[in-house]
Amino acid sequence: MSKQIKVYLTKAGLGKMRPHDLRHSLASHLLKQGIDLKTVSELLGHSTPLVTSLIYSHVLKSHAQESIAKLPY
């Protein structure tokens, strides 16, 4: 399956991207859209949300900073 995904990535002009990069991008986008950590963790098949939070802590931190910057004060 990984080889077939690489074929599609190359056809799309994303030849340097790995299948795992797609997984990481999906998780990052879901978290930035406000999908809760538990749901993202389950979708990724992580054993606990803690695992997800450790891997994606940079996304969670930047999302929090962006959200705070939007506050009207």
Image (tube, helix red, strand yellow):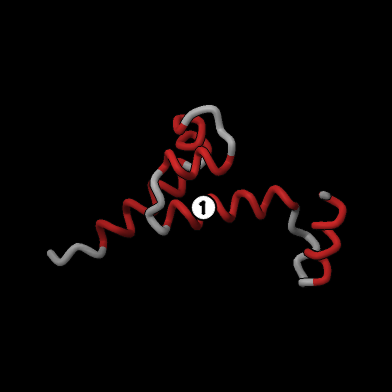
Badge 1 crowding class, 10 Å Cα cut-off, few under 14, some 14 to 19, many 20 or more, is some
Q: Which quadrant of the figure has residue 22?
A: bottom right
Residue visible at 53% across and 37% down? 55
Q: Which quadrant of the figure has residue 8?
A: bottom right
- Percent x, y for residue 2? 82, 49
- Percent x, y for residue 26? 57, 54
Please tell me whether residue 62 is drawn above or below residue 12 in the rendered image.
above
Q: Is residue 31 left or right of residue 72?
A: right
Q: Nearer the viewer, residue 4 or 25?
A: 4
Q: Is residue 46 left or right of residue 30?
A: right
Q: Is residue 4 left or right of residue 27?
A: right
- Percent x, y for residue 65? 32, 54
Residue visible at 74% across and 52% down? 19
Please tell me whether residue 39 is drawn above or below residue 65 in the rendered image.
above
Asked which secondary structure carries label 1, the reply is helix
Residue visible at 78% across and 60% down? 16
Residue visible at 83% across and 50% down? 1
**What residue is pinned by disc 1?**
28
Quarter of the image with the C terminus in it: bottom left
- Percent x, y for residue 27? 54, 50
Which residue type does callout 1 highlight?
Answer: Ser
Farthest residue to the left: give it.
73
Count of all numbered marks drawn on residues in the image: 1
Farthest residue to the bottom: give it.
12
Please tell me whether residue 55 is drawn above or below residue 6 in the rendered image.
above
Q: Is residue 44 left or right of residue 19?
A: left
